[in-house]
Amino acid sequence: MARTPHNDHIPAPKRPGKYPNKDRLWNAIIEMLHQCSEYPSDSPEARMGSPSDAQAFVQAILDILWYIDGHHQTLANRVKIPKLFEKFEGYNVPEKMKKRKRERENLKVDRLTDLAYRLSRFQTRSWMKVSNWIVLKDSVDALVDATTQYCTYLKEKNKVGRQQQERLILKKDNYTLELLPICPLPSVRMRDLWLKLQSLGDEEAFVDVNEYAPIDRHQRFRYLTDLQAGLPRKTVLLTFSIGGSTPDYHFIWVARQKEEDNLRMSTSFIDEIKAAMPEYHSRAMRRLYMNRFGLFTKDAPAYVLREIYSDLTHDASGCRNVEETELKMRLEIALAAEDPDIIVDLRSLNGDGSDRFEVFWQHMATYINDKSSVHERRQSTVNYMAVAFSVRDLIEEVSKLCPEGTPIPSQTWTRYQFHPKHPRSMAARLYLKRFNLKLMVQQRLLRLTHVDAHYCAAYFRYMREYAVLHRDHCQMISMDDKHRLKLGEPSYPVAAVDREIEVIVSARQCHGRR
């Protein structure tokens, strides 16, 4: 903006130099001042004082806007930035610098307080009270108030952080030990816990906070938050973090006056509680145990090995499914009753495990190999019956091939020896898949004869030979869903059946294949 007599006191813009982004911010502030003073005033009080005073004012605004650049959203969560200064964002971006990239620094109380104080010195200037600068004055006042309020908020947060750090006695990977402050009037939720601690007196014992905390996770969080505020006596809180979705374990006891007694008692409690804490092992660790010791204990069932592993290693991991949970509960009952005969494995009644229909299955396999075929459009190891008949007919045909007296299975048991029609259905779990066969009726598996088949083949052959004979005037293209026809260069021969084999031909040779 060009200088006029009423705004010649405003500092001049800068050319981009060593810090181009900061110079751009300077020029943006200068442009804003010109817009604020666009209404001329003949009063000498409207001038921004001396040139050095105007220079210092612009520098103060630039420093504070440069410092809070990138933190507008953080400030907006607590205070309100004046609308006049909201647009001054995106100039201080240290992570995008070409020569020296660095992370953006957090706002510090001392630095922000100093910048706000330097800007507040211009609030009492006489030229700020003129009507020309009323918008600028209100925005500067609001910016100083906002930064001051945020500094107060940071001081309170730092104070709370220091108090928590002072309360912290010991912190390890899986547990934290902290000293709670004294609160003469604790929350009403702490009444039962405090009565329990009072009943212990001077006895060296701890209390499990989880027994008094609510089950609901939201109410439990509020309960633990109130506990952090403290109790009428100085107490020590021990928090064990197991990890995963398992909630933390909290234990509390009354602190002693001597620091030596507190350290001795805390060490004793931590060792006692740590020994009682549940452990959670991975499935790979349990599988390694089963594979290693299961070879020498083939007679021991899997659920017994799992219970032995859990008892020896104190593994508190949950079961994989409902069946394992039921077996675990039954085994615990048997161990508590000290009666191993309370559980009976009904599978022992199945005999030696041999299949009495083995002869029938062998003859069925022979019959299936003669009567089944692969699917012409699918790539799989499952065969399909080439003729349509029921399971009863299949059993009757195979029975004729078996010796007299051979056990014959039922229709349902025979059907379960095949592959299921729908592999993802619930009934598919019952199929044993003994034979690579599906009992389904498929179309176009057999080549049926026709009285005109010879004439159709001869007609197609004549068309192909005619196209070869008059190759310069006609073309014959036969489309098939299982064949790729490659188009060659003009006037060059192309093999009609391409099997990815190179063929040497002459210039006048043409290929045709029956």
Image (spheres, rainbow, N blue to C red):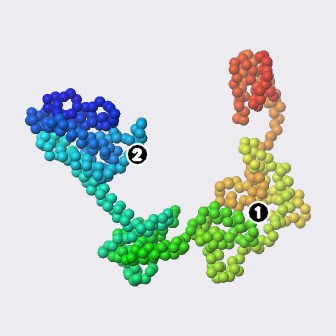
Residue 307 position by quadrant: bottom right
> Does residue 442 lie above or below 175 as drawn?
above
Which x, y percent locates residue 74?
33, 50
Residue drawn where x is 63% and y is 63% of the image: 285
> Does residue 78 lie above or below 37 as drawn?
below
Q: Which amino acid does label 2 sit on?
A: Glu
From this viewpoint, is residue 212 visible? no
> Does residue 46 lie above or below 142 as drawn?
above
Disc 2 secondary structure class: loop
Residue drawn where x is 77% and y is 16% of the image: 507
Q: Say which residue label 1 marks.
A: 413
Residue drawn where x is 45% and y is 79% of the image: 205
Q: What residue type is labelled 1?
A: Trp
The answer to whether marks 2 and 1 mark residues whose Cβ atoms lie closer than 8 Å is no
On residue 103, the disc is 2
Is the residue marked by circle 2 packed among few (<14), some (14-19), or many (20+) residues within 10 Å?
few
Disc 1 secondary structure class: helix
Q: Distance between the residues labelled 2 and 1?
A: 71 Å
Is 108 placed left or right of 49 in the picture? right
Is 155 placed left or right of 104 in the picture? left
- In depth, the one of 123 and 468 nearer the eye is 123
Which x, y percent locates residue 393?
81, 57
Is the residue marked by circle 1 packed among few (<14), some (14-19), or many (20+) residues within 10 Å?
few
- In depth, the one of 119 and 459 nearer the eye is 119
Residue 93 position by quadrant: top left
